[in-house]
Amino acid sequence: MNTKITTTRIPHLDGENGIIYPSANVMLDLNQLKKVYPTPKGEYVVLEDLNLKIMKEEFVTIIGHSGCGKTTMLSMIAGLNEITGGSISVLGNRIKGPGPDRGVIFQSPSLMPWMTALQNVLLGVNQVFPDASKAQRHDIAKYYLQKVGLEDAFYKKASDLSQGMQQRVGIARAFAIKPKVLLLDEPFGMLDSLTRGELQDILIEIWNKEKITAVMITHDVDEAIFLADRVVMMTSGPKAKIGDILNIEFERPRTRKSVLEHNDYYAYRKHLIDFLEH
């Protein structure tokens, strides 16, 4: 069976190549993005002329070789890394730094080790919902900890939790602040394959319910396909940009079994590997 692989050409401007993006549906807009770092030998251009539009409620995964600027791009979206040129907008508003409209899940959960799981989630909830009652804020934190399977670990210190459990706290903390955009920087990269699979399932289950726009960096081609509506492929650095975009047309909600058994799965996989090996 011949599988038709659908890719998306990224235009320089809206409407170019006949592609028009309804602005009301664009959650995240990266326009002419550029990042330069000074070095003793002169400027090093990490990203240049990078254009990407991500729709409301879309789950996008980003792959590319190490050093291509994936994490740099994500940290710029998070407002944690200064933009050299171009712009990043959320719902048409240019970002000027970190904000509660963007939640971040890092490879390392970065918890306060002396605090309990509940207290770690409350750190964000208390800041984002200052007008809520203490009981309401606790209910929000407990709800998301339950969602990630930690209903028995509310009062355990982060230092007493396994790496997988700590990352569950990180997922709960990110969803609990109700961000418009969820940014994930290889959140399962340090976990064993079994735990990784479990947390992928938990992540996608919560995402299916919350429908928050999500952007996730991964080195894992199978993970990229399983989770995403589109897989964005970045060219190698320096001067990295978007090289190709693969539309993943599996129905949602998905199961791992249905994805693996789908006729298009291996064609998608081959397309991504061919790009990375090119």
Image (tube, grey):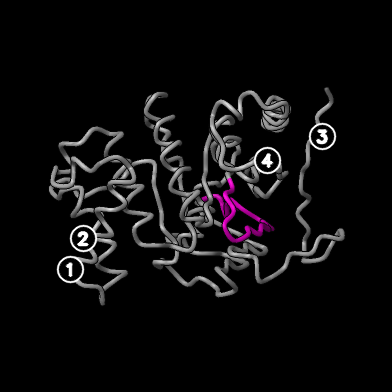
Instruction: Assign a secondary structure to mark 3.
Output: loop
- Ranked by sequence position, the earlier of labels 4 and 2 is 2
What's the residue type where badge 3 is placed?
Lys
Left-right relation of 174 to 162: right
- Mark 3–mark 2 Cα distance, whole angstroms, equals 49 Å
- Alpha carbon distance from label 4 to label 1: 42 Å
Q: Residue at x 14, y 42 (%)?
A: 156
**Secondary structure of residue under mark 1:** helix
Residue behind mark 3: 4
Magenta residues, as a range?
Answer: 40-60
Q: Which mark is residue 7?
A: none
**Residue underneath mark 1:** 134
Tell me the kind of residue under disc 1: Lys
Q: Taking 84 as reference, is 207 above or below it?
A: above
Looking at the image, which is closer to me, 56 or 274? 56
Q: Amino acid at mark 4?
A: Ile
